[in-house]
Image (cartoon, rainbow, N blue to C red):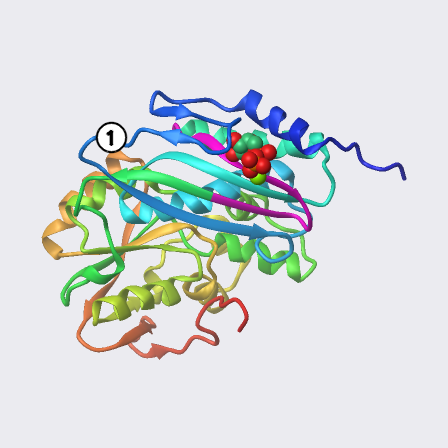
Amino acid sequence: MSDPPRAAEFDLIELIRRRVATREDVVLGIGDDAAIVQVPVGKQLVIAADTLNRGIHFPDNTAPADIGWKALAVNLSDLAAMGAEPAWCTLSLSLPTGDPDWVGAFLDGFLALAAQHRVALIGGDTTRGPLSVSVAVHGFIAPGRALRRGGAQVGDDVWVTGTLGEATGALTQWRAGAIVDPVLRARLDRPTPRVAVGARIVDVAHACIDVSDGLLADLRHVCDASGVAAEVALEGLPALPELLAAFETQRRQAIQATGGDDYELCFTAPAEAREAIDRIAAESATPITRVGRIVAGQGVRALRADGSEWIAPSAGFVHFA
Ligand code: ADP
Ligand code: MG
């Protein structure tokens, strides 16, 4: 086997710089010691950062373009959960070899999603080491308008965008050595950050989080921050037909409730907001499903159709646990 092609750090940076799109509010992009940007008057900056490590955040056989897409998607999902409008990002790459073909394919996925959301890549870092991708995104919000975890109120409905469980369904099949359904795999590799929905629900939602560690675990964060409890109806969790076909009901519901890697939004809103939320779902062509309600107390209870409580085998993904 011949060694993969290598390029020096500055050749890779040049390869990246040549391909990035800019925006009017980027005063100085890639190429100097730091980037300079213009924050719109009257807006606050919202910042999120997330890292993907090989073998932990994506299977070893993930295509470079999919790693690129996902590295940005998980970050945009965090901005979406705040209701912010994304603008800029940085990219820190740790690469085992300086393979320009790998970087090119990575950029195909990364920049495709960046273009969809008009996000400009304005800087980063390129080093040698185990494969790791660290992205930070910056976006705007009007002062005081951001959706936080702490605003849920007793009586609120609990909603989720899109569908739950497909990503973990794909991982489950992959770990079992089974044939992975391509639709499930696409949900694992190319999550859809719900940026448009996030921006629209700021007017009606009381609290919001994105589902990365599993619905019950992430909703628990909302409840803890808000000093309330939640009840979730297991049989009402939205799923794609491919997930329904791939797992029997109990297994599937466990995956949907605890799986994670969905990058859907989970938010709470008062009952008066139901019509507005249905409208937002229609306008943004994104299903939004009512899955539970906020009650007094502590913790999250998942309920079966007969009203009995379902106890999750584990509470979600925790690093270092
Ligand atoms: P310095 O040594 O001053 O940190 P670098 O050589 O690391 O400079 O980076 C030079 C320029 O290239 C900077 O503008 C930096 O933000 C940008 N850059 C480096 N790596 C990346 C990357 N992976 N993606 C985008 N921009 C990058
Ligand atoms: Mg540097």
Residue at x 25% of width, y 37% of height: 282
Mark 1: few, some, or many residues within 10 Å (few <14, many ≥20)? few
Q: Quadrant of residue 211?
A: bottom left
Q: Is residue 276 above or below residue 59?
A: above
Magenta span: chief secondary structure: strand
Up the image or down, 151 lies above or below 320; here it is above
Q: Classify 238 as above or below 31.
A: below
> Looking at the image, which is closer to me, 80 or 34?
34
Q: Position of residue 140 (x, y in %)?
A: 28, 38
Q: State the residue in front, 29 or 20.
A: 29
Residue for point 26% across, 59% down = 149
Mark 1 and ligand 1: say if the CB distance to the nearest ligand atom is below 8 Å: no
Q: Which residues are magenta?
A: 118-135
What secondary structure is found at the residue carrying circle 1?
loop
Instruction: Give the residue at the far front of this rendering.
Output: 33
Quadrant where the image shows the N terminus:
top right
* Residue that label 1 marks: 40
Q: Amino acid at mark 1?
A: Pro
**Which residue is at a point 9% across and 52% down the rendered structure image?**
272
Quadrant position of ligand 1:
top right
Residue 121 sits inside the magenta stretch: yes
Task: Classify residue 172 by image quadrant.
Answer: bottom right
Query: With 54 as the anchor, is 190 left or right in this view?
Result: left
Q: Examine the rendering and report whether any part of residue 109 can be seen.
A: no
Q: Position of residue 240 (x, y in %)?
A: 44, 49
Instruction: Give left or right: position of 114 versus 216.
Output: right
Height in image: 114 above or below 179? Answer: above
